[in-house]
Amino acid sequence: METQSGQELRGRDAIAALSEDWAHLMGNRTESRDIGLFCIDIAHRPEEAQAMHDRAYFIVKSAVGDRSFAFGVEDRDGTLRIEGVVVLRSRDGERLTADAKATEIVRTRMTRAGVDASEAEFRFTGYGNGVEHGTARLRTLVARFDGAVETDRGEKIADAKQAGDLVQQEWRGELHSRKSRDVMHLVMSARAGTDVEAFGAAARAFLAEEFGEHRYVFSLHEPMSDPKAEQVGGKRPHVHVHAIVAMRAENGDRIETSIGSFRRWRESLAEQARARGIRMEMTDRRDQAGAPAYSRNQVRPVSHMGRTEHAATSRFAALRYEQKRREVPTAARTVRSLDYTERVRSRWLEVARDAENINAKSFAKAQLSRIGAAGSFLEKLPGVPDISHENGSKIRAALVGLSELVEVENMNTMTRSEFEAYEKRVEVTLVEAERLLPETWRRRFDEIASAARDHVDARREMMEQAEQAGDRKRENLRARQADDINRSDAVARQPLTSLEAGHDAMIAVESYRELIASAGADQGSPDKASLQSSLSAVLARAGELGAAGNAYIREIAERDDALRAAIEAAVQRSAVRTRNRAGGADERHSARNTENEIEDREPKSEELMRADRMQSAADTRTDHTKQRVSRLEELQRQAERNRDRDEFER
């Protein structure tokens, strides 16, 4: 195997290490519990066999309610043991979990139905996920009781085939099975004879382009180097690549597995193949009236010699398998598909009319013939008669409504509430159509119901992916909002603190400026010289605040040249202090002493000392908003009193 980074992996140890390396990308989502196994011990055995059977059926029915089930009864020396398999989801949507809590729910239901707890003891003995698990468990039950197994409808299950048909055809739609999908298995194949190295390079480039943000491993399989024998599925005649891709990337994004995604992947692979000399095109089955593919649940391989042979698991699956095997001309019946087919017909007509190559003309005519044959093929199939009875118009209306609900191209993402309403509409439409259909349409209806539920599953996957993407966006938004709030709080606190400190400093500056202006024109007077020194000191303090980032001071400095010069001087002093700190402790000490001496040589007036005390109080003041606001108001009142006093003295 080769990883997304080009590293080659060999052996089980490398695979085990890869599993650990991917562990953080796995969602560890629990699979749905679809099938439950149960056991009921009955203390007293009825004398008559029919009474024993009737009593056993009543007890099982009272225990599991309106659910599909099958059970067998064993006589154990005067007591009875019932073992059974039950669909855990009821027809009205209630799902049991097959654990201790569910056991108590069942026992309470039995008591209400009149079954004494001392008479019958119920317990769940296991559970599982999906059709395959249910089929295996029911077949095991049939083998254990030698065919003496009965369903909730009173029908006998005689052998393994009937058990498989029951689960795959009837129980399937009731399971609503969900498996965790943490990885995706992708298979890319080309026809026999394709250049192996070129196709391997094309697959490598395709994976890197489509899943570059994800972790993946892939392995090229071709006949000559495949270690598996042909009898067990190895040495296939066509070259192919298996890839295992982690659904979740490192950044949390998940792969979208929609119809549109599958189509884009096929186009991308074909483009990479053509770039390496391989003649490959992405072909829609509607382009050549191809039959729909069968799923792996509808067939099981019985021979790998050459082209793999399969055996169908149901009558409908056998019909679909044969159609695809022989590529019977088939037309999709939705409105969009009919429009698409009409466009395809027009293109083939152009090729048949205008192509110069005789082979191209012949091929186009063959496709036109297939499209024409496909138009009436479904109506001619055995076992698929026309709707020509009293409910015909109602059935047509139901099927048309269902077709519109599951239109392939209409794959817009839904919210959970929208999806739940959509899923309910599909189920209601299916129930209505099944109720009205004649018995001769039962096998055909299995195809319709299976396709509709597969479409619902795809839409559920899209909805869950959208929810996960939305959760990540909401988490990121909450984180950003929290950061914004924190920043806003800090910004809200910073302006108040800055405003207060800057306001105190600028009150002192303006006070000294007013005192200097009122001292008269005598520049050499002692009072004016002292006031000028004090103004220089408070400007220096304001400059320090501005250099430290005080927005209030910086805003005033845009129109105050003296304050701007003080800020620039403070910035220079800060740079000197930084260099001194880098030069050693002694130099830092000397620089501090020099600054202190400069400050000590400047006489401080009473107003300057008061301003210093105000600044000190601002530095130690608490962050309480009301205190800040009241302090600002106090400072404003004090400034007004100082101006009034100065006016009076002048």
Image (cartoon, helix red, strand yellow):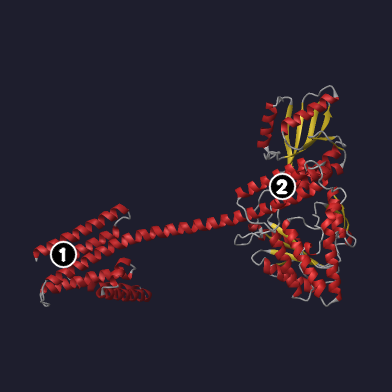
| 101 or 94, nearer to the observer | 94
Q: CA distance from mark 2 to mark 1?
A: 86 Å
Q: Quadrant of the C terminus?
A: bottom left
Q: Is residue 315 left or right of residue 85?
A: right
The residue that label 2 is drawn on is 177
The answer to whether residue 380 is visible is yes
Residue 418's place in the image compared with 529, above or below, is: above
Residue 29 placed where, x, y %?
Answer: 66, 50
Residue 548 placed where, x, y %?
Answer: 33, 68
Q: Secondary structure at mark 1?
A: helix
Residue 152 placed where, x, y %?
Answer: 78, 34
| 402 or 515, nearer to the observer | 402
Residue 93's place in the image compared with 593, above or below, is: above
- The type of residue carrying mark 1 is Glu
Q: Is residue 134 left or right of residue 159?
A: left
Q: Secondary structure at mark 2?
A: loop
Q: Quadrant of the N terminus?
A: bottom right
Residue 190's place in the image compared with 316, above or below, is: below
The answer to whether residue 550 is visible is no
Q: Residue furthest top?
A: 47
The residue that label 1 is drawn on is 606
Disc 1 crowd, CA 10 A, few/some/many (<14, 14-19, 20+): few
Q: Residue furthest left?
A: 649
